[in-house]
Amino acid sequence: MKSFFVHNTFSSDDDIQFAIKNVKKAWWCFCPNANLYIENTLPEIERITKATENILIGTDSLASNDQLSILSELKIITNKFPQITLHQLLTWSTINGAKALKMDNELGTLEKGKKPGLVLIENVDLQNQKITESSKSKKVA
C-alpha cells in the first residue's frame, strides 16, 4: 500500500524521516497553487528533495485552485525554488506520477509498448534549463 503526503507545508525534517523509515512506499505530492490559495505558503520543497526522490506534482482540485495545469504548478516551483532543475520537474510530473499510481508500465516515458500522453512545453529557457513565465503547454498526442 502506498501513502501520499499532499501539501506538506508544515513537514519538518523529523516528519519526513519518520515517513521514510516507517511508511512503505511514501510519496510526496506538491500542489503549490493550492498551497498558495489555501494558506498563502509553500512547502519547503528543497527539504523534501534532499530526503527522497518519491515526489510528484498535482493540482489538488478546483475547490482550492483556479486551474488544473501541471505547467502552472511547475512555474510556481521554478519561481520560488530556482535550484530545482528542469529534469527534476519533468521527472516529478511524468514518470514519478506514473510510478506512484502503478501505471509506469504504460505511462510516464516514451518507450516501445507504452501509450503516454505527449505534451509539448514551448518557450523553455534551454540555455538555463528553466521553465519561464511565457512557457506554454500544448497536447500533442
Image (spheres, grey):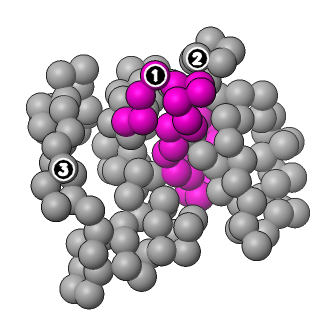
Q: How many marks?
A: 3
Q: Is residue 116 left or right of residue 135?
A: right
Residue extending furthest toward the top:
40
Q: Is residue 59 above or below residue 87?
A: above
Residue 117's x, y, as percent? 26, 62
**Of the residues under marks 2 and 3, which one precedes in the sequence?**
2
Residue 37 bears which disc, if any? Answer: 2
Q: Amino acid at mark 1?
A: Asp
Q: Is residue 111 above or below residue 5?
A: below
Residue numbers of the magenta segment: 44-69
**Of the residues under marks 1 and 2, which one precedes in the sequence?**
2
Q: Secondary structure at mark 3?
A: strand
Seen from the viewer's position, the closer of residues 36 and 49 is 36
Q: Residue at x 65, y 56 (%)?
A: 27
Q: Residue at x 21, y 59 (%)?
A: 118
Seen from the viewer's position, the closer of residues 6 and 16 is 6
Residue 66 bears which disc, if any? Answer: 1
Q: Quadrant of residue 105?
A: bottom left
Tell me if label 1 and label 2 are in contact, CB under 8 Å.
Answer: yes
Q: Amino acid at mark 2?
A: Tyr
Task: Report how far apart the C-alphas of labels 1 and 3 lie in the structure.
Answer: 20 Å
Q: Is residue 29 left or right of residue 135?
A: right
Q: Amino acid at mark 3?
A: Lys
